[in-house]
Amino acid sequence: MNEELFQAMAQSIIDGDTDKAVSLANQAIAQGIPPMDAINKGFVQGVNYIGNEFAEGCAFLPELVMAGDSMKAAVAVLETELAKTGATRDVVGTVVIGTVQGDIHDIGKSLVGVMLSVNGFEVHDLGVDVPIVKFVEKAIETNADLVAASALLTTSMTRQRDLVEALDDMGLRSKVKVIVGGAPATPTWAKDIGADGYSADAVGAVELARSLLAAR
Ligand code: B1M
């Protein structure tokens, strides 16, 4: 039963049909489907399909843009639902999150931010295309425990290394943990650039953040 709904969700993203995607997101909530299931088993399948088609030259930028817009709208509905579950927790730690400079992909980053927030972190989301200096300034201003940098492009991921270096130069590395994520990042990349950890998804990012702060 849910399989049909998940397939319809994926198709709405492939079609770039935002109204349909939002309606299906609301339907999932009404049916009591966990928001992360709707995102991962439904909508993400569609955006991954378009992403692969784009990479193979079988889909073009307008389709990628439409899929991204529909995905963003559907995820926004589900994020609102997710946020309701975390209203009364104590603050576990303070996180500054953003997508690095040169990169405007925000769907995954925002999801990671919402999941951290739902799980008790105070989250300062700087948005997309964030210069390194902004991450550093915000980390100092908020006395952050952790900086989380997302990158979806092989061209922008090098900024994650710049971020680690900048925090190092400011003498903040012993205090501020750095985690990285996004499609091109890997555990090896995180290790190579001196980050404290990598996560492949939003749920893993929460576990990683928790374990890093607990280990201090
Ligand atoms: Co872009 N794009 N895009 N795009 N886009 C990719 C990333 C690409 C892989 C598509 C492809 O070719 N297969 C490719 C990158 C190739 C590469 O670098 N090797 C690509 C390209 C090339 C581009 C442009 C350059 C296209 C162009 O203009 N010619 C351009 C770049 C613009 C820029 O940033 N400067 C571009 C633009 C766009 C849109 C604006 C149209 C749109 C984004 C809309 C938006 O974000 N508001 C878009 C989209 C939608 C995609 C794909 C199809 C989907 C991304 C997405 O939202 N996924 C993507 C292909 C793909 O990933 N399948 C692609 C869903 C989201 C929930 O997952 O973001 O991976 P994701 O986040 C996950 C995990 O990665 C992880 O957790 C999240 C939730 O589970 N995660 C973290 C993410 N950040 C994390 C941080 C953490 C921990 C985990 O800790 C800090």
Image (cartoon, rainbow, N blue to C red):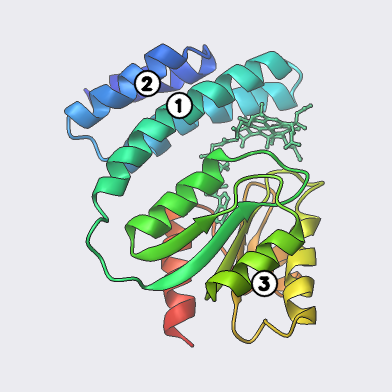
> Foreground: 82 or 140?
140
Contact flag, marks 2 and 1 (Cβ < 8 Å): yes
Q: Is mark 2 within 8 Å of ligand 1?
A: no
For disc 2, the marked residue is 22
Q: Position of residue 196 (x, y in %)?
A: 61, 74
Front residue (pair 96, 32): 96
Residue 178 visible at all: no
x and y percentages locating residue 15 in the rendered image: 52, 11
Checking the image for residue 195, the label placed there is: 3
Q: Which numbered disc flags the more N-terminal residue, 2 or 3?
A: 2
Mark 1 surroundings: few (<14), some (14-19) or many (≥20) residues within 10 A? some
* Quadrant of the image occupied by residue 27: top left
Residue annotated with mark 1: 73
Identify the residue at image location x=46%, y=86%: 215
Would you place residue 165 above or below residue 9 in this image?
A: below
Residue 74, position as x, y percentages in the image: 41, 27
Circle 2 packing at 10 Å, graded few (<14), some (14-19), many (20+), is many
Q: Are marks 2 and 3 in contact (CB under 8 Å)?
A: no
Q: Is residue 54 left or right of residue 49?
A: right
- Does the image show residue 143? yes
Quick check: 50 above or below 80? above
Q: Is residue 1 left or right of residue 182?
A: left
What secondary structure is found at the residue carrying circle 1?
Answer: helix
Q: What is the x, y in percent for residue 85?
A: 24, 51
In the rendered image of this protein, does residue 210 appear above or below residue 30? below
Whichever of callouts 2 and 1 sits on the residue coming sooner in the sequence is: 2
Q: CA distance from mark 2 to mark 1?
A: 6 Å
Q: Is mark 3 within 8 Å of ligand 1?
A: no
Q: Secondary structure at mark 2?
A: helix
